[in-house]
Image (spheres, helix red, strand yellow):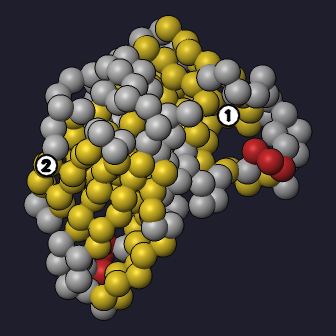
Amino acid sequence: DAMVIQNPRYQVTQFGKPVTLSCSQTLNHNVMYWYQQKSSQAPKLLFHYYDKDFNNEADTPDNFQSRRPNTSFCFLDIRSPGLGDAAMYLCATFGGTGNYGYTFGSGTRLTVV
Amino acid sequence: SQQGEEDPQALSIQEGENATMNCSYKTSINNLQWYRQNSGRGLVHLILIRSNEREKHSGRLRVTLDTSKKSSSLLITASRAADTASYFCATDANRYSTLTFGKGTMLLVSP
């Protein structure tokens, strides 16, 4: 099935140790998003790509970076994770047509120790 | 902020009952969407209603939109235990803007 796949499902990293989360899609959607969701909170947009055009939210910390080497893949890099960065990270795509919303991956739960 | 606000924050009902969740937002919208999230999983798109629509149905889901009151409701009829999840509304200001999510309603349906 065409879908959005996030790896890994669970990631444990040490305080200050760089970590990369990955997202891939088989939908050929031109827009990809990274959301951060902390416990019992709304998903919060970090950044998104429209094709290769990168759009950073104003309040996204510099500690968070992203790469989109091609249409199918998008990466979230956290350069120096802090305890406050522990959260669920959600990748989503959008094809821009019809009555369909975003398609989300299953998320990566990040724990910082 | 465009962020939607859902109420109630939590809702507990018995199987077979209807569940109604509400969402309010602050500025004009292009469309409003509802998503479902099972515990520890990603969000699943349920239904989209455009700003010029007032009501939409999909299976056991009924969504209404009142742009004059900047509010929407999601009704799940004849609920099942499998409907237990968190439900989020999300809005975008125009066709090219991104979605902003509310804090969600946690629905518990007991057998």
Which chain does tag 2 point to? B
Query: Where does residue B6 sit, x and y in percent of width and height?
Result: 45, 56
Residue A102 lies, with reference to residue B47, above or below; the image says above
Which is in the foreground here, disc 1 or disc 2? Answer: 2
Q: Which is more toward the observer, B85 or A19?
A: B85
Point 21% across, 53% down: residue: B63
Query: Where does residue B29 sit, x and y in percent of width and height?
Result: 35, 30
Q: Are marks 1 and 2 in contact (CB under 8 Å)?
A: no
Could you tell me which secondary element the residue under label 2 belongs to? Answer: strand
Mark 1 residue type: Thr
Residue A80 lies, with reference to residue A65, above or below; the image says below
Which chain does tag 1 point to? A
Q: Which residue is mark 2?
A: B56
Residue at the far right in the pictured view: A16
Query: Where does residue A55 sit, x and y in percent of width and height?
Result: 56, 15
Could you tell me which secondary element the residue under label 1 belongs to? Answer: strand
- Identify the mark at residue A20; answer none if there is no mark: 1
Separation of disc 1 and disc 2 at Cα? Answer: 40 Å
Residue A30: quarter of image:
top left
Quick check: do tags 1 and 2 share a chain? no
Query: Where does residue B8 sit, x and y in percent of width and height?
Result: 45, 67
Residue B29 in the figure: left or right of residue B18: right
Q: Residues within 10 Å of mark 2 (few under 14, many from 20)?
A: some
Point 39% across, 36% down: residue: B91
Quadrant in the picture for the C terminus of chain B: bottom left
Q: Residues within 10 Å of mark 1 (few under 14, many from 20)?
A: some
Residue at the far front in the pictured view: B68
Point 30% across, 81% down: residue: B81
Quadrant in the picture for the N terminus of chain B: top right
Residue A81 in the figure: left or right of residue A25: right
Mark 2 residue type: Lys
Residue A8 in the figure: left or right of residue B109: right
